[in-house]
Amino acid sequence: NFSSFNKLQGLKNGFIYCMYEDHRGNIWISTERSGVTRYDGQSFKNFTSAEGLPDDKAYSIIEDHTGNLWIGTYGKGVCKYDGRSFTQFDVKEGVINKNVVSILEDKAGDIWICTLGGGVLQLKSALDGSAGTFTQYTEKEGLPFNFVTCILEDKKGDLWFGTYGGGISRFDGTSFFNYSSKEGLTSDYIWKI
């Protein structure tokens, strides 16, 4: 049985980039130009720049182990939502590229941010739960291409990055191992892993 949701039910925009279920069972929906929408099973609540979201073009959403939501925007970087307010991470915090398309929390609690043009950012977790420091990984550090579209952590803890034009890269915490059409991939343009 399918249910359909649109503006009549409270969904502000049907152009959806991703959906995420938090630990409370809420469904978070990132949209094109309408911010982020939370569906609690009964009703929709929309969060836009009027509520503190840095940009209304939200691409990705994850929840970290402490219950904070991390939202990637296209043009204004990444922000953290603690249930009350949004905290934006921008150039002054080390987010050099503001086009964030994918986010992951690894098993160690570090937040990984994939950007279109700026490679990957790692936000080291701090023991007291406060934000640590950002480390940027680009072609200079071994990525095959700086347009990184997606990320996955495997059972061993290695991170796999899909790129838009450079194939796939595996990071073991020290080195990048790159795989492209030269190694047998059917395409170097990877959207999901």
Image: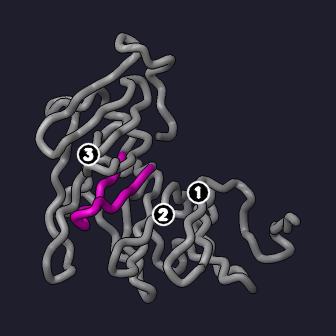
Q: Three-letter amino acid code at disc 1?
A: Cys
Q: Which mark is residue 61?
A: 2
The N terminus lies in which quarter of the figure? bottom right
**Is disc 1 placed on a helix, strand or loop?**
strand
**Percent of width and height locating residue 166:** 36, 24
Which contiguous range is marked in magenta? 102-114
Is residue 192 among the parts visible in the rendering?
yes
Please identify the dominant SS of the magenta region. Answer: strand
Task: Check disc 1 and report the residue beneath it.
Answer: 18
**Is disc 3 placed on a helix, strand or loop?**
loop
**Percent of width and height locating residue 136:** 19, 47
> Image point 26% across, 49% down: which residue?
156
Residue 162, compared with residue 28, is above or below; it is above
Mark 1 crowd level (few <14, some 14–19, many ≥20, 10 Å Cα): some
> Image point 55% across, 66% down: which residue?
20
**Percent of width and height locating residue 2:** 86, 64
